[in-house]
Amino acid sequence: MLTRPFRSVLYIPGSKARAIDKARGLPVDAVILDLEDAVAVEEKARARATLAEALAEGGFGHRYRVVRINGLDTGWGRDDARAVADTACDAVLLPKVESPAQIDALAAITGDRPVWAMMETPLGILEARAIAAHPRLQGMVMGTNDLVKDLGARATPDRVAVMAALGHCVLAARAHGVTVIDGVYNAFKDEEGLRAECAQGRDMGFDGKTLIHPAQIDTANAVFGPSDAEIDLARRQIAAYEAARAEGQGVAVVDGRIVENLHVDTARKVLAQAEAIGQIAAE
């Protein structure tokens, strides 16, 4: 079974028809069509209509379409949710999720539509386990800028202030089979810094990175996708393990390292992801 990649997840203002149209041709795995932070108060209603029209038009190909609505406690959230329920999107992203009850409230409006949750407040992080366990939840997105603000912390290159929160959400997501996406890197012209933060997130177990500019897509795709060396190693691990099993042995050795069943499981996931990415590239 192929694994849908979420290496690159690009925020796009829901009020910007030209930006939405451009996204149809970008090499991005998913888009977050934003009705919240990226849209001014006076543009909220118009953005909702613009976005609905763009989604109805289609043409997004493999790109997973997530709509971020305003919170249900705002004057726009419930209208957003009702609009999303009737649009051709793949999931709805709820900001500042702090309890499963908020997901229940959203699902009462959007029905069977998969829900993603913004993890961006101290209480939300503490409740990550319960949020991830909700049967409607499909994805979690780290809102690191808001989290740093609410913590009264300082944003540093090593992200030490939010490392506990990042790790906690990865644990919750993996425990319940939920996709988990790392927060944005604000300096979109700093390719070196972006690559380092992507590598950090990938090493922690994140599935991909939220992005604020199309210039960040290639870096996120490269870091969060398997390298040629990783694909080669995965193939050799599987072949060596199968050969060992055929000889009645429980482990194999590849490049001087033990290969057990757990390593083979990981290797198969690497090859499945590579195959899925190959199919996207062939579009």
Image: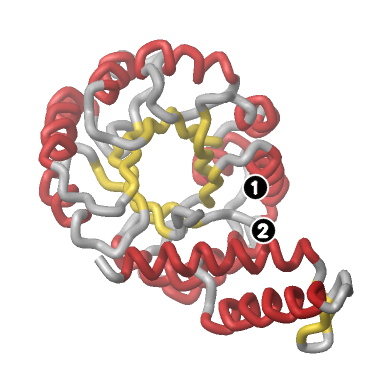
Residue in the foreground of this view, choosing between 259 and 29: 259
The residue located at (77%, 62%) in the rendering is 262
Q: Is residue 188 left or right of residue 121?
A: left
The residue located at (62%, 41%) in the rendering is 177
Identify the secondary structure beneath mark 2.
Answer: helix
Dot 1 amino acid type? Leu
Q: In this view, does 232 lie to the left or right of 19?
A: right
Q: In this view, does 148 lie above or below 108?
A: below
Dot 2 amino acid type? Met
Q: In this view, does 168 lie above or below 230?
A: above
The spot of residue 124 in percent (x, y) is 61, 29
The spot of residue 117 in percent (x, y) is 50, 32
Residue in the foreground of this view, choosing between 241 and 5: 241
Residue reaching furthest to the right:
249
Q: Mark 1 points at which residue?
A: 166
The residue located at (71%, 67%) in the rendering is 264
The residue located at (55%, 69%) in the rendering is 271
Q: Residues within 10 Å of mark 2 (few under 14, many from 20)?
A: some
The spot of residue 180 in percent (x, y) is 55, 46
Report how far apart the C-alphas of labels 1 and 2 lie in the structure: 8 Å
Q: Kindly indicate the quadrant of the structure image that contains residue 134.
A: top right
Quadrant for the C terminus in the image: bottom left
Say if mark 1 contacts mark 2, CB within 8 Å. Answer: yes
Q: Earlier in the sequence, mark 1 or mark 2?
A: 1
Q: Name the residue under label 2.
A: 204
The spot of residue 154 in percent (x, y) is 61, 50
Q: Kindly indicate the quadrant of the structure image that contains residue 266.
A: bottom right
Identify the secondary structure beneath mark 1.
Answer: helix
Q: Is residue 16 above or below residue 197?
A: above
Q: In this view, does 231 lie above or below 62?
A: below
